[in-house]
Image (cartoon, rainbow, N blue to C red):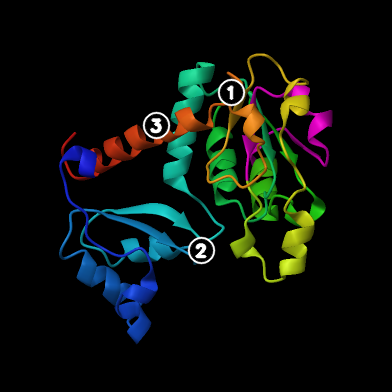
Amino acid sequence: MLHLGGSVEGFSDAANSSTAKGESLADTIRTVSSYVDVIAMRNPKEGAALLASRYSSCPIINAGDGGHFHPTQTLTDMLTIRALQGGFEGHTIGFCGDLKFGRTVHSLAEAMSRYKNNKFVFISPNELAVPEYITQYLDESGIEYTTAERLESVIGDLDILYMTRVQKERFFNEQDYIRLKDSYILDKAKMSLARQNMIVLHPLPRVNEIAPEVDDDPRAAYFKQVKYGMYVRMALIAKLTGVL
């Protein structure tokens, strides 16, 4: 918004709003939408953005709703894929890490399933496997996918590797987090098994799932992804506010 010459109002934590006093989401949205031209909303509850859209007098951008979806990140990912891999079709895409709670994974898998000849490889421990509602959607859509527990065994087949962090904030048991947080670490040794034209994406922030030694590899595209993300969000805001 600032790059477009606009200004920003709002709060980064609902605890700093009237929600902390017991105000409903509906009333918060009705109030805030009276002051602004567009609302970018991140909420820990699945479906919150959809609910907000029913009460808002301005457009709502879903910037992530719990472990459900993250549409703006998906637009970022897809622009990166188009720019670096030439298009949206015919890719083998590996999703690695926290696939259970990773809303960016859920969003991108559903979006890329709409294009021809894409295949998915879901790489995770059983405890962090992709949710059933995603695999059910893929089954119903006739999309080919496989699962794996070892990144080394499949990285050579991938055109795109989408790494994710194990999200501490999604765990109720810290012991489970500690046990699983280092399940997958991408390093030079694993990259040596990958295709020369594979790209590595990550929604960020990373913790230690991608070793810093990978950053200088020309296939590491996650910081380019950040720049594309700025362009995508600028375009989306401009479209929704009538600038484009």
Q: Can residue 161 be seen in this view?
A: no
Residues at circles 1 and 2 in contact by the CB criterion of under 8 Å: no
Q: Is mark 3 on a helix, strand or loop?
A: helix
**Which amino acid, by three-letter code, is at mark 1?**
Asp
Say whether disc 3 or disc 1 marks the residue closer to the N-terminus: 1
Q: Is residue 202 visible?
A: yes
What residue is shown at x 47% (from left), y 22% (from top)? 82
What residue is shown at x 23% (from left), y 44% (from top)? 240
Q: Mark 3 points at which residue?
A: 227
Q: Name the residue under label 2.
A: 46
- Pointer 1: residues within 10 angstroms few (<14), some, or many (20+)? few
Residue 196 on image: x %, y %:
67, 14
Residue 216 numbered tag: 1
Above or below for 89 versus 209:
above
Residue 179 on image: x %, y %:
79, 58
Front-most of 102 and 211? 211
- Pointer 2: residues within 10 angstroms few (<14), some, or many (20+)? some
Of the 4 image quadrants, the one containing the C terminus is top left
Say whether disc 1 or disc 2 marks the residue closer to the N-terminus: 2
What residue is shown at x 26% (from left), y 53% (from top)? 59
Question: Real-space Cα distance between discs 3 and 1?
Answer: 17 Å
Question: Real-space Cα distance between discs 2 and 3?
Answer: 27 Å
Residue 91 on image: x %, y %:
63, 23
**Which amino acid, by three-letter code, is at mark 3?**
Lys
